[in-house]
């Protein structure tokens, strides 16, 4: 950790910390509510809790840890205040907590996007698409591992990053900033991939244009995360500022919605059964075995002409009068395992 000679700031000992905490816990609360609702839907309504839900639970856990780190940074580490007014012990604590929070951010984003990819794997059976999703998951794990390792190697020995006066070999401030920017750029790219992917497979669904547009908008909410990440990345220069405890506040303020709105947006498609439930379209679980539809009833067979539906694996009880609209099949893939025969 470098030693700086701080000059008295012209605006005095102001604090942005409490505003950051308000934003932090508001976003975390929204993410937590959406995750709880997602798990409730999958456990109580649809009874099809899957690996995408498990990854989202992990992401929610790590973002709560991140909120705890930010709270400690504000209360004890001086986040949001000018470094001039902080004690050396506070600046050391801030550096250690901030380093941990960056790693938490990388890990949370990885688990959130893996959850999205696995959710999409539950919808699509096409081989090439599934291979692309598995490749995306592999890239997410690889990139995250690289960035975490870079942060673990920011100084040798590592504790020199937050302790002054130690002999150590550390990354320069510019290299540290470049690492953060590189992570941000890759995160934006993966956000755009996850948001754009549904547009391609929804073209093969036998549903109304209105339904397609609605589902595209619902599953494309990740664009919000990409915008937040772009702003956060543009503010990465704050990591090399001498007055980092003050200047980094804007970066943190955009990092919070990037992570937590990302969780909310990832949960949104899985929450659609709640709407259907209150519309009276969700059947009791006792009728699940009689009325559940297969994936092939939703997606066109890759070898058929556009405009035809693949009902090869349909239940014998699902007659032409009981299959209902294609929107019903889409609802199945949005997490519903049992739908009433008269769902229309």
Image (cartoon, rainbow, N blue to C red):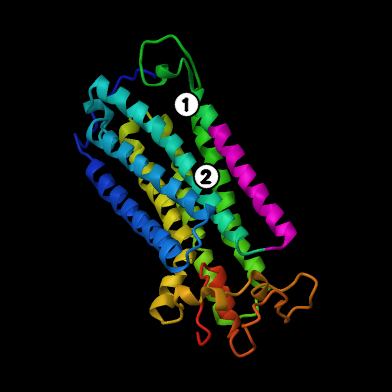
Give the label on residue 110, or none.
2
Q: CA distance from mark 2 to mark 1?
A: 25 Å
Q: As drawn, which residue projects farthest toward the bottom?
A: 321
Residue 141 is inside the magenta segment: yes
Residue 202 is inside the magenta segment: no
Of marks 2 and 1, the one in the foreground: 2
At mark 1, the secondary structure is: helix
Q: Nearer the viewer, residue 230 or 289?
A: 289
Q: Residue at x 31, y 19 (%)?
A: 5
Q: Is residue 261 above or below residue 107?
A: below
The residue that mark 1 highlights is 173
Can residue 150 be seen from the camera position used here?
A: yes
> Across the whole image, how many numbered discs are drawn on residues?
2
At mark 2, the secondary structure is: helix
Can residue 212 be seen from the camera position used here?
A: no
- Give yes or no for contact between labels 2 and 1 (Cβ–Cβ under 8 Å): no
Q: Which circle's residue, 2 or 1, is located before the other in the chain?
A: 2
Magenta stretch, residue numbers: 125-147
Where the N terminus falls, by quadrant?
Answer: top left
Q: Nearer the viewer, residue 35 or 245?
A: 35
Give the label on residue 150, or none.
none
Q: Quadrant of residue 119?
A: bottom right
Q: Nearer the viewer, residue 120 or 228?
A: 120
Q: Which x, y percent locates residue 276?
A: 44, 77
Q: Quadrant of residue 277?
A: bottom left
Q: Residue at x 59, y 60 (%)?
A: 120
Question: Label 1 crowding class (10 Å Cα cut-off): few <14, some 14-19, many 20+?
Answer: few
Q: Is residue 40 above or below residue 308?
A: above
Q: Residue at x 30, y 39 (%)?
A: 68
């Amino acid at each position: 950790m470098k030693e700086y000679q701080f000059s008295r700031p012209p605006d005095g000992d102001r604090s942005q910390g409490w505003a950051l905490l308000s934003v932090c816990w508001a976003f975390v609360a929204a993410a937590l509510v959406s995750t709880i609702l997602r798990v409730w839907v999958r456990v109580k309504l649809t009874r099809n809790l899957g690996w995408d839900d498990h990854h989202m639970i992990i992401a929610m856990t790590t973002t709560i840890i991140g909120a705890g780190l930010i709270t400690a940074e504000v209360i004890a580490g001086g986040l949001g205040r000018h470094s001039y007014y902080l004690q050396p012990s506070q600046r050391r604590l801030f550096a250690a907590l901030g380093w941990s929070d960056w790693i938490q951010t990388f890990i949370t984003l990885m688990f959130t996007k893996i959850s999205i990819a696995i959710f999409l794997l539950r919808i699509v059976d096409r081989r090439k698409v599934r291979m692309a999703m598995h490749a995306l998951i592999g890239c997410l794990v690889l990139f995250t591992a690289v960035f975490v390792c870079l942060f673990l190697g920011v100084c040798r020995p590592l504790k020199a990053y937050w302790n002054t006066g130690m002999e150590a070999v550390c990354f320069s401030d510019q290299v540290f900033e470049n690492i953060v920017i590189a992570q941000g750029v890759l995160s934006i790219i993966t956000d755009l991939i996850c948001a754009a992917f549904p547009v391609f497979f929804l073209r093969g669904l036998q549903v109304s244009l209105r339904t397609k547009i609605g589902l595209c908008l619902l599953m494309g909410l990740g664009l919000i995360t990409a915008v937040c990440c772009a702003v956060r990345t543009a503010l990465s220069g704050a990591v090399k500022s001498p007055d980092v405890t003050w200047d980094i506040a804007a970066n943190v303020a955009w990092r919070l919605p990037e992570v937590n709105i990302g969780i909310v947006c990832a949960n949104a498609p899985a929450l659609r059964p709640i709407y259907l439930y209150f519309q009276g379209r969700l059947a009791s679980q006792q009728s699940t075995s009689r009325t559940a539809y297969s994936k092939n009833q939703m997606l066109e067979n890759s070898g058929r002409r556009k405009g035809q539906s693949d009902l090869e694996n349909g239940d014998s009880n699902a007659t032409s009068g009981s299959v209902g609209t294609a929107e019903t099949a889409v609802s199945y893939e949005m997490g519903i395992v049992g739908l009433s025969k008269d769902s229309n």
